[in-house]
Image (tube, rainbow, N blue to C red):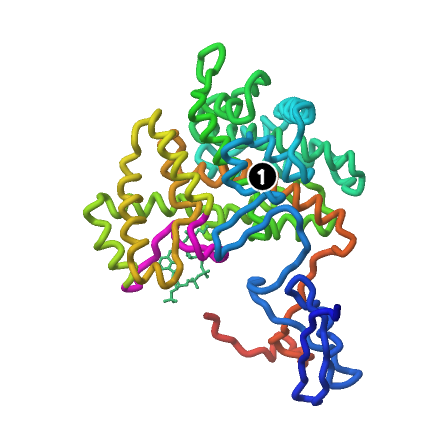
Amino acid sequence: MAQDSLKITDSRTNQTYTFGIENGTVRAMDLRQVKTGPEDFGVMTYDPAFMNTASCRSAITFIDGERGILEYRGYPIEVLAEHCTFLEVAYLLLFGELPNETELKTWVNEITHHTMLHETTNKFMEGFRYDAHPMAMFVSTVAALATVYPEARHIQDASNRLLQIKRLIGKVPSIAAMSYRHSLGFPYVYPDNDLSYAENFMNMLWKMVEPKYVANPVLARALDILFILHADHEQNCSTSTMRAVGSSHADPYLATAAAAAALSGPLHGGANEEVLNMLDEIGSKQNVPAYIKKVKEGHGKLMGFGHRVYKNYDPRAKIIKWTAEQVFGITGRNPKLDIALELERIALEDDYFVKRKLYPNVDFYSGIIYQAMGFMPEMFTVLFAIPRTVGWLAQWQEMLTDPEQKIARPRQVYTGHRTRTFLPMEKRLAVAKA
Ligand SMILES: CC(C)(COP(=O)(O)OP(=O)(O)OC[C@H]1O[C@@H](n2cnc3c(N)ncnc32)[C@H](O)[C@@H]1OP(=O)(O)O)[C@@H](O)C(=O)NCCC(=O)NCCS
């Protein structure tokens, strides 16, 4: 069968070119053949914010934004959230298959035995100001792990790579919990290897003077489900950062810190904090119609609504809504939920939102759950970074083992001056600065 192709004619030369279409893409490098003459560099694509550029082939996460489908390694997110633990899903994302019983036992045991931080890391953490943002502490401390494990830079060695992956997955909850306790001025709590991944995280967050921390099983499961939902989301801003930094063969601690830095921005990991601010501003259910009217008139956005990829209900938001009910059964209902439900009800019936395909996204309900569990909003992005570390590492590993990948290096369209005459200081005129 003939290969699908794209035929284009260059109006400058009248020459026609045929490019193969594979997986719905044409190779950007093929366009370089399109030239006006031997001196011409050839045509490039211009794609600010990578709105229409596939930068890799990936077999990890599938998203169909129109239909609201999210799958990890081919398994629907709903099925994984219902039947698996977070570490089981981490194994799936990293190795491509669900573990059998023995594999899972070994995997959990290995991750559990990498939760402890070197004492120098604890000291490093102590050096932060009392009011440092938890996400800034998280990013810096993950980067600081590179000083503890210098061998991590041998990224071509598969077994060395796997060791660092296990260390990172094991240690990110410990770092996250330390950043939380540092903010509150509480002493750090050491990991407890008897506990599950989520329970141990809760132990490091909330243990006070009791000899053994006992986690509420409903809250531990809710946290584990939230971790599953946030584990990977294909080539988003932080994952692309992980791949770009990793493509220079930087060590995994530094690449993960860079990815976490990308996540810290309010346009990425920080949106759930904004949802809470919005619900505070609305104040009560009765004020919802007036708020929606304001948004429709162009004053602000409905935070937690809309998505670059999903033009349907974000499948994660459905699961989070269910999880919220479980959590509130223990913590008591967060009164913000009623405002959120009313907001969703009215928006989903409103032409403005229907026409633009604006549905609740993952951030719409997650902040309400986190707040009910007792987290301050500054911790929300750190809670996102723990599970996303798994996605970053799976994508990093896939990138390093992909023979087509090289150091990431986009092109530019240069719009500045060319070869100018240098003026000595005494001849330069003052230029007004904006
Ligand atoms: C996520 C987001 C950045 C996606 O943006 P995008 O794909 O670039 O979509 P656009 O900004 O082009 O939006 C398309 C239209 O919907 C409107 N729109 C998008 N999100 C909206 C929202 N949350 N509330 C009200 N209107 C919204 C835009 O104003 C635009 O309207 P127009 O066609 O009349 O100009 C955007 O929906 C948003 O800012 N949402 C709120 C923040 C949020 O929840 N972020 C978390 C994402 S997981």
- Residue 78 lies, in percent from the top left, at 50, 40
In the image, is residue 262 above or below residue 389? below
Residue 119 visible in the current orientation: no
Confirm or reject: label 1 Cβ below 8 Å from ligand 1.
Answer: no
Q: Quadrant of the C terminus?
A: bottom left
- Tell whether 371 sits left or right of 350: right
Query: Label 1: how many residues lie within 10 Å, few (<14), some (14-19) or many (20+)?
Result: some
Q: Nearer the viewer, residue 342 or 249?
A: 342
Q: Amino acid at mark 1?
A: Ser
In the image, is residue 365 above or below residue 288? above
Is residue 313 highlighted in magenta? Answer: yes
Q: Residue at x 61, y 25 (%)?
A: 115
Q: Nearer the viewer, residue 300 or 59?
A: 59
Q: Residue at x 42, y 28 (%)?
A: 184
Q: Nearer the viewer, residue 335 or 123?
A: 335
Residue 414 visible in the current orientation: yes
Task: Kindly identify which residue carries mark 1.
Answer: 140
**Ligand 1 - quadrant of the structure image:** bottom left
Is residue 304 highlighted in magenta? Answer: yes
Question: Which type of secondary structure does the marked residue at label 1 adopt?
Answer: helix
Q: Residue at x 58, y 26 (%)?
A: 122
Q: Quadrant of the N terminus?
A: bottom right
* Residue stretch in magenta: 297-314
